[in-house]
Image (spheres, rainbow, N blue to C red):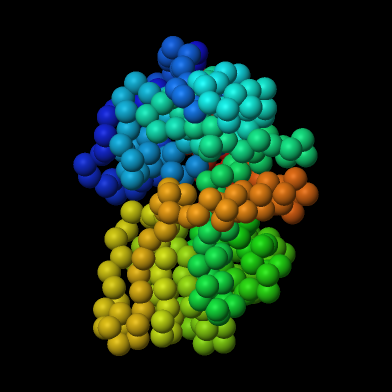
Amino acid sequence: MRALILKHDGYEREMPDDPTLTEMDPFVRLGELPVPEPGEGQVRIRVALAAVNPSDEMFIQGLYGQPRIQGNAAGFEGVGEVVASGGGSLADRLVGRRVAFVAAVGVPGTWAEYSIADAALCIPLVDGVRDEDGAAMIVNPLTALAMLDIVQGEGAPSFIVSAGASQLCKLMIGLAAEKGLRPIALVRRDSQIELLEGLGAAHVLNIEGEDFASRLRAVVREEKPRVFLDAVANQLSARVFHVMGRHARWVIYGKLDAELPTLVEPGQLIFMNKHIEGFWLTRWMRDTPMEEKAAAIQTAQSRFATGEWRTDVTAVLSLEEAMSRLPAELATPNGKVFLEP
Ligand SMILES: NC(=O)c1ccc[n+]([C@@H]2O[C@H](COP(=O)([O-])OP(=O)(O)OC[C@H]3O[C@@H](n4cnc5c(N)ncnc54)[C@H](OP(=O)(O)O)[C@@H]3O)[C@@H](O)[C@H]2O)c1
């Protein structure tokens, strides 16, 4: 089968100055791999569409929280038809079904004609769900739902998100507004302000605007956000956290900027009970009770089926096209790129 195959093992030792993916060739090659065999409790899936998430970009460069396996296909998330079972009643029942899935650890990933998933981590899809939504149904939607629980657990209606026009934040902002929450979104393009206000953001601030610092202070005074969901984690993030009030939580869940943040006033952690923490879906999947995970999966699927959530698509590329065009397509704002093996 054809696949985009990892060229390196393990992790990159040094964080590059800029983690943006500009070339594929140093990290993956287009090649042939044997069709993989599912183990007990696993299924083989013919991949219809595979997502390209920021985590994939970091992973192929050796910058993600999981080691690369040289010679394996890349790609975490996708959608496709289950074509074989490795045994076990759950896996057997999935044969012939269209499923959203995350590839099992240590097997060929989703940037390939076939991939392997644990049957328990496959979501059988209803007809109304498009492949583009199925291929992006797990990583971002479940993270958005889990992090909204963190916000709701704090009891304050307002919260701040960085990278506000990401697919993840767009899902979160719409749902948060429906729940009566008041998201404050940070973006770096004026063109995204109306879009996010339309989805339900209470405020959208351009971090590159000259008056950003004073507007942020005013909005924080007015809304008193308790949680900062941050996918950028640079010095501006540290300044946002500094402006927030007592008991604020800075939840870092991505590192879209290579700049390292320095705390503006560490004393705030001591005297104002402010906290810094991380969120990783992999840990949430491991630690969350099954019923809670099932409820989140159910919510995600039904929101996509009804059209309340929709994945914006910038491009669908073949594996060949990905080798030359993927970095440029990823640089186009406001949508996701998919691979069609
Ligand atoms: N921790 C977890 O478990 C977990 C799970 C899922 C996702 N994530 C993280 O969530 C984030 C969003 O994922 P996604 O798939 O929704 O992303 P996406 O749709 O590709 O969007 C990325 C967004 O980040 C913005 N951005 C990129 N570099 C930036 C920088 N240096 N400063 C400010 N903004 C920047 C882009 O802004 P422009 O529109 O201006 O280009 C874009 O809006 C990623 O960091 C991803 O790794 C984490």
Q: Position of residue 123 (x, y in %)?
A: 61, 38
User: Which residue appears farthest toward the left when viewing the image?
Assistant: 13
For image coordinates 42% across by 58% down, the residue present is: 279
For image coordinates 61% across by 60% down, the residue present is: 172
Would residue 283 be found to the left or right of residue 320 on screen? left
Q: Position of residue 242 (x, y in %)?
A: 37, 79
Q: 22 or 221: nearer the eye?
A: 221
Q: 107 or 322: nearer the eye?
A: 107
For image coordinates 69% across by 37% down, the residue present is: 125
Residue 3 visible somewhere in the drawing: no
Q: Which quarter of the rendered picture does the C terminus lie within?
A: top right
Above or below 33: residue 248: below
Above or below 81: residue 260: below
User: Which residue appears farthest toward the front when viewing the image?
Assistant: 89
For image coordinates 30% across by 80% down, the residue present is: 269
Q: 56 or 247: nearer the eye?
A: 247
